[in-house]
Amino acid sequence: MDHDMKRRTAAEFFGTFWLTFGGCGAAVLSAAFPELGIGFVGVALAFGLTVLSMAYAVGHISGGHFNPAVTLGLWASGRCANKHVGPYIVAQLVGAVVAAGALYLIASGKAGWVPKGFASNGYGDLSPGQYGLGACLAIEVLTTFFFLLIIIGSTSKGAASGFAGIPIGFALVLIHLVSIPVTNTSVNPARSTGVALFAGGEYVGQLWLFWLAPIAGAMIAGTLAKWLYDDGKIVDTVVVERRIA
């Protein structure tokens, strides 16, 4: 692995770590105490803020994907080079699992703490609102589709330069506000995998949906965006200023 790829994968590792630790940490640590008052809104903001902050911290290094569905959606749109896809997804998965492990270590320091769902995603009995498989599949496909459309549109030629992290971060907030009651919000297979491995049992058994649906939504958006935006070049970044041929 050359020096550039090492920097890129490190950026994806740290970005996905922060997203998983910050977003799921808000759900596991803060939302567990009603008197703190963060609720769904606080958790949604936490996820959006993780992406917003890391997009500007390391987005200029790797493109700020932090999500296998984003990587594959950008690849489908012609905005992610073939050689980056595999290493990025591996780095994202490792970052999410390490973050979930760190979160588990911290959360288990409270006497009597029980992980329960540990911020995992689920359908049917594991859905926060007891939504069925069809509804959970539909919302994950739709929300990831629009998430990618916003990412690609915000980083397209003609979009306001340097501000893409803001609509992308707020889009993730909105997605969580809508879909937390349905699936506990995935739109990110790495984030789903990291916490499910520690929740175990049925949550691991339902992971297939939270790979299939986000990737399907992302790749549909990427394919459509290739026609819609027609930039004619690969843009491998969320922060826009750095473009690669």
Image: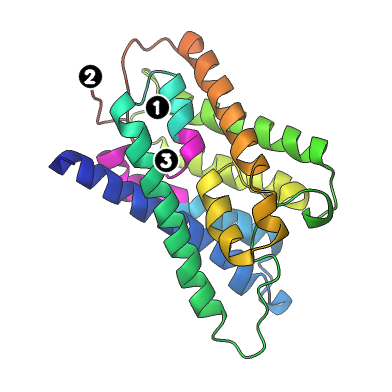
> In the image, is residue 199 above or below residue 151?
below
According to the image, label 2 marks what residue?
245
According to the image, label 3 marks what residue?
165
CA–CA distance between discs 3 and 2?
A: 21 Å
- At horizontal 61% and vertical 58% (from top left) the residue drawn is 196
Query: Amino acid type of disc 3?
Result: Gly
Quadrant of the image occupied by residue 211? top right
Asked whether residue 64 is in view, the answer is no
State the image coordinates of residue 14 (x, y, percent, origin top left).
35, 55
Mark 2 residue crowding within 10 angstroms, few (<14) / some (14–19) / many (20+): few
The mark lying in front, picked from 1 and 2, is 2
CA–CA distance between discs 1 and 3?
A: 9 Å
Q: Main secondary structure of the magenta part?
A: helix
Query: Amino acid type of disc 1?
Result: Thr
Secondary structure at badge 2 equals loop
State the image coordinates of residue 171 (x, y, percent, origin top left).
57, 39
Q: Nearer the viewer, residue 146 or 87?
A: 87
In the image, which disc is placed on residue 155? 1
Q: Nearer the viewer, residue 141 or 202?
A: 202
Identify the mark nearer the N-term, 1 or 2. Answer: 1
- At horizontal 23% and vertical 19% (from top left) the residue drawn is 245
Identify the mark nearer the N-term, 1 or 3. Answer: 1
Q: Are marks 1 and 3 in contact (CB under 8 Å)?
A: no
